[in-house]
Amino acid sequence: MRELRALLRLAKPLLPGIVLAVFLGTATVSAGVGLMAAAAWLIATASFHPPLGDLQMAIVAVRFFGVSRGAFRYAERVVTHSMTFRVLARLRVWFFERLAPLVPARTGGLYSGDLLARAVGDIESLEGFFVRVLAPPLTALVAGTALVIFFAFYGRAPALIEAGVFLAAGAGIPLAALALARRDGPLITGARAALGRASIELVQGLPDLVAAGRTRDAVTRAVGAGRRLTGALRRRAVRDGALEAAAGTLAQLGILAIFLAVLPAIRSGRLSGVGLAVIVLAALAGFEAIEPLPSAAASFREQRSAMARLLEITGANPAVTDPPIPLTIPAPWPADLPAIVMEHLRFTYPGAPAPALDGIDLDIAPGSAVAIVGASGAGKTTIIELLLRFWEGWEGRLELAGQDIRRYAADGVRAAFAVVSQRTHLFTATIRNNLLLARPGAANAELWHALEAAGLSDDVHAMPGGLETWIGEQGLALSGGQRQRLAIARAVLRDAPILLLDEPTTHLDTVTERQVLGALERIAAGRTTIMLTHRLTAMERYDTIVVLDRGRIAERGTHAELLAAHGLYRQMWDIAHREFTPA
Amino acid sequence: MFLERRLLDEAQVERLLLATAVGCGLGVAFATVIQAWAIARVVALALAKTLTGSSARQPFAIFAAATIVRALLAWGRTAAASVASQRLKDRLRQRLATHIAELGPLALGGEQTGELAGTLSEGIERLDAYVSTYLPQLALAAGIPIGIVILVAFRDLLSAAVLLVTIPVIPMFMVLIGGAASAKSRRQWTELARLGAHFLEAIQGLTTLKIFGRIHDEIGKIATTSEQFREATMGVLRIAFLSALTLELVATISTAVVAVQVGLRLLYGKLMFEPAFFVLLLAPEVYGPLRALGAAFHPGTQGVAAAERIFELLEAEAPHLEHAPTVPPPPELHIRFEDVGFSYPQHRGERAAALDGITLEIVPGTTLALAGPTGAGKSTIAALLLRFAVPGHGRITVDGVPLEEIELGAWRRTCAWVPQRPFLFAGSIADNVRLARPDAGMAAVERAVAAAGLEPVVMRLPAGLETQLGEGGAGLSGGELQRLALARAFLAEAPCLVLDEPAAHLDPRLEADLGAVMSRLLDGRTALVIAHRLQTLRTAGRIAIVEAGRIVETGTHEELLRSGGVYARMVAAE
């Protein structure tokens, strides 16, 4: 019930809206009950041929309830929909705020955005919680209580029976649905996930499957996974259908029970025929309050597991805490201090068997250019994650501008870096919006200057929309080289003292790589540059090259020194130059 | 009102079950009428002060029986509709999966694989509400109101007339509901989806936002755009809900009118109590089915949107890879591309390379290497030889036999593919190596793994060849994946190879003997290699340089160097 508590906590500021929704829901049901009860009274009384005046009141009541019910229903729908959007907005802000401190350390690393996509779907499935799950039972409670009190005027038996019906059909059946769902809920979730996986295997593995002549097996697997899901859904629908039918049956048996219970009262004249007509029609109309409850239970069981998944993500402890009184990085950057110092730096990811960095010693002087090379898994990404203060818990020394990196606030540390990486996220927006991310409120001239520096201004001039050009989903309307140069332009606008380049030319062909490297060279002037790469292009320009191997520094020196040393770097160089990537 | 024709054709197959569901629904309505009759009878007896245990026995029994029947039919309706929907989904998924496989990798394009897999899984699931709820409810909404009005007419004509007058309001209601789905409100729903996509992107780009110190701004943006959207949408919904308001008002006001007019006629002795009460009980039932239809409308719309995408895919034409009568692959694999042209479907955009006038020859037992810049069309040439698609122009022949006339299954066994990044299927390493030869024994798999130099990797893994890969299992690095692709090819033992040469990884341990492994694999085989290494080009029988979809040069390494053309310049530049 941790999930329910968390949801209710989120609901607190929306309480007035929920109260209003419940009030309007109750008013709608009550108007329906009033309409039918007044109509029953009217017809039953009329059969005794009283003077017309005796019926006036009832006629007015019938008309009033007839019109007001529609109005209440309309108001209720407007309020509940408005609430749904508010809830969605609140949930999004809540999740985003909770998630921000956890990324990327607690969410599977620097490049794991896809994992979170599922969470976004979960949030959307929660939007209906207050309207479809929380409000209906409250409405049923209020409306049911009112109905039972109303029945009590006609006798104890009808009131007790109606209370029993509301309890059995309104609470018993939904609870039974919840209990039964405990078993097949995970089954359906599992089947859904298996179907998703089988579909991805078929679609993304299609080239391999077609070439190997194995498509039929993959089709069979996907269809089989689909059948397991539809089978489970069918069993659930059949069971839920039975429960829903049972709820209706309970309400109708309640009417039969009222009939049987009031027989003696009717005979003795304690209850009139008119009273019986009113009770029966009111009971029939009142069922409307319980009708949505079984499906509310169904929604709740899905939303509870959605919320559980979200809480699992947000419940993690942030990997980094800011110091109570953070230092600020001196500006201008002190020229006499090393920009970055690593000494015996050692870091093991939680749960990993071996350290990712195992005793790194590295001084980077301000204004110098350092390349860190190594195969994938050598520890390059870890260095970035530590420098950008995404992790704590390392051993040794890690200093920025002469101070332990932990003495700065994380945002302050990141402000010292302009980052260009192979996977820099471009947002589905215009070129301008993507640039403004790095410097909000920048003038057009500044934007063009940055594009110029990145070697992209001619391209953007040639685009029909100029700065307003829409760059497609995550920049896919641009070519690979253009995307990368846009990321560089962003780094220029960022105007930070340290340029951190994380394999900025991966996935680019040689010509484009040269363009991008050229742009990088222009903007690197006067900045401390750290380049992490596994492509050995233009290595002569680095003051120091550090060769990483399995978390240790295997070699260091200038390009010429390392080539002459005939070590690991030389081997890598030879491999790289076996490669033939013609322009 | 909306109906998706192709989806209806699909639902036709389940007409028996859907008719059962509708029949059950009609039965429920009829049982409700019976219950109303019984209630009216009991109340009439009570008013006449003749309600006793014996006089009530008959209506009580009928009421109880109707209640049980009603419950069973209501259950039957849900069950039949659900079974129909599940069967329809199963069948569509079978067709869509088969069709995706037939369309092949080239027709699908690279970017949208996620969306496509989503259509195959969740897209088809979204048809549920349309098939199991909306469709049966549509039939019931058309049938039940009329049926009840007719039954009412037997007891009281005037009340039937009152209810009948409201029936023309029903199409009006439908039009209004249509209005709710009209351009403006549809735009709002699209906007909602876009807002959702934005949020997803903010989440995926969270690390980037963090590096740029923009978290606070983004939170504010999420809150304000959501609020602006809510205000705009509520403006539209206030109008869209008027259709529901109309239905609600028609239902309650006509019930009120029926009540008042039968009450007045009762007063003046023109009507008996029992038929009057019966009519009052039935009046709300006329509108119940319409209300249910309104509730089923929105989930139904999602089904229609999903159906449009599903049928668009199903109607995409699959390439005709095989022309009967077919022959087995010729023993002599003399492959010729004769003036081959190919262009991609429009939607793939400008980056897809089109081929034009490709003429090539691969002599049996030798390697032809393709070289050229990214996007020049090398992969497309390879894809055509692998029969992922058919040339739009010209032909490919093997020993004079057009490729389409060679039995497809046998060709797949003849010609193996080594991609740069093989896809890892959920399963063990052994299963993944066995892709092209699922029946291969463990000894053969071990030999292939050794030949590809994958052995050291396998030995490091906890369960060796039985280690589970894929989601939830172990992953492999880029270099290890390439070795796996090579192992697959060794195991396939195919006489023809299409090899996308692995890009270099700066891991000397993985690179050490890759050249030797590849030459062992290529030795004696007829091969088309997309080359990335000078070494491979030097040893290849012939080289073809591809640029912008055309062959610009062919010859051996030495010939091309001597001719001083494009290739010679490329080599000099390295």
Image (cartoon, coloured by chain):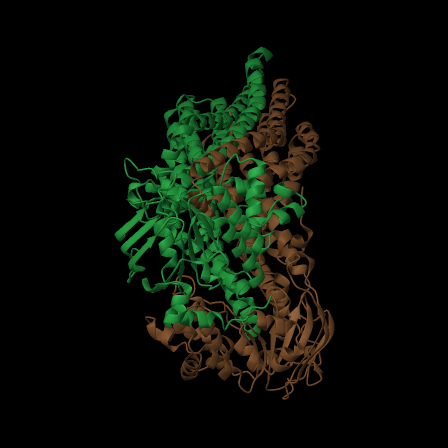
Q: Chain B's colour?
A: brown
Residue A316 spot, x, y in % from top left = 32, 46
Which residue is more in the foreground, A271 or A76? Answer: A76
Q: Residue furthest bottom?
A: B331
Q: Quadrant of the C terminus of chain B?
A: bottom right
**Residue at point 36% right, 43% down?**
A413
Residue A583 spot, x, y in % from top left = 60, 66
Residue A456 spot, x, y in % from top left = 59, 49
Which residue is more in the foreground, B72 or B358? Answer: B358
Q: Is residue B336 left or right of residue A23?
A: right
Which residue is more in the foreground, A302 or B341? Answer: B341
Q: Is residue A440 left or right of residue A354?
A: right
Total labels drawn: 0
- Is B240 placed above or below A549 here? above
Question: Does residue B247 appear anywhere in the picture?
Answer: yes
Q: Quadrant of the N terminus of chain B?
A: top right
Q: Chain A's colour?
A: green
Residue A525 spot, x, y in % from top left = 47, 49
Question: Does residue A43 appear anywhere in the picture?
Answer: no
Q: Quadrant of residue A294?
A: top left
